[in-house]
Every structure is written in structure tokens, then in C-alpha cells.
């Protein structure tokens, strides 16, 4: 399953994330948090700028999980 590591890491830390960053968006790559953001667009742009085409998870901490099979950004 794609992003299995990132989803597992999110689930393991969800309570801490909720306590510290309720309603924010988190960017996770592997088992690393790249940051917390108030808006999805800012989180996604940050992730793309930092990681390029490497896999990453952008998830709202108190929101439902949404699956986008693949996002391709390019020229």
C-alpha cells in the first residue's frame, strides 16, 4: 500500500498531534514530520518544494482521511 509508513506514523502520533496542532495540516515523509500548516494548499506546496517527487502524506489532523491515488505536478 502506498504511504503505508506515513499513515502508520500518523496513526501512532494522532493523539499528540491533536493535542498540539488541532485542525492543522501535517506533512509526513517516511517517519518524519516536515511541518504543520493552517491551510492544505500551503502544506502541499511546502511538501512539493521540499520533497519533489518523493512520496509524502498531507493530512488534516482532525479531518477524515481522503485518498488521492496520484498527484502529478509538472510542466
Image (cartoon, rainbow, N blue to C red):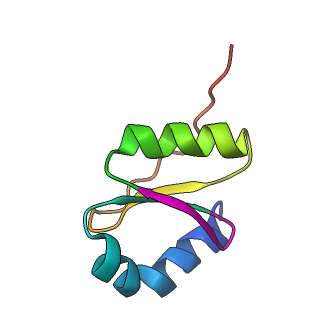
For image coordinates 40% across by 37% down, the residue present is 41
The secondary structure that most of the magenta stretch takes on is: strand
Residue 62 screen position, x and y as percent? 27, 68
For image coordinates 37% across by 44% down, the residue present is 40
For image coordinates 43% across by 40% down, the residue present is 42
Q: Nearer the viewer, residue 13 or 7?
A: 13
For image coordinates 67% across by 20% down, the residue present is 74
Residue 5 screen position, x and y as percent? 65, 73
Specify whether 18 is left or right of 26. left
Residue 37 screen position, x and y as percent? 39, 53
| Rendered view: 54 above or below 16 | above
Residue 2: name its quadrant.
bottom right
Magenta includes 75? no
Specify whether 25 is left or right of 31. left
Residue 6: name its quadrant.
bottom right
Specify whether 68 is left or right of 55. left
Q: Nearer the viewer, residue 10 or 46?
A: 46
Residue 17 screen position, x and y as percent? 38, 77
Quadrant, the C terminus: top right
| Rendered view: 41 above or below 16 | above
Q: Which residues are magenta?
A: 29-36
Q: Nearer the viewer, residue 66 or 38?
A: 38
Amino acid at each position: 500500500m502506498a504511504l503505508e509508513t506515513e499513515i502508520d506514523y500518523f496513526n501512532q502520533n494522532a493523539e499528540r498531534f491533536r493535542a498540539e496542532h488541532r485542525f492543522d495540516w501535517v506533512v509526513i515523509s517516511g517517519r518524519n514530520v516536515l511541518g504543520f500548516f493552517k491551510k492544505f494548499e500551503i502544506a502541499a506546496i511546502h511538501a512539493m518544494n521540499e520533497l519533489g517527487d518523493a512520496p509524502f502524506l498531507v493530512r488534516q489532523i482532525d479531518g477524515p482521511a481522503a485518498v488521492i491515488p496520484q498527484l502529478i505536478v509538472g510542466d
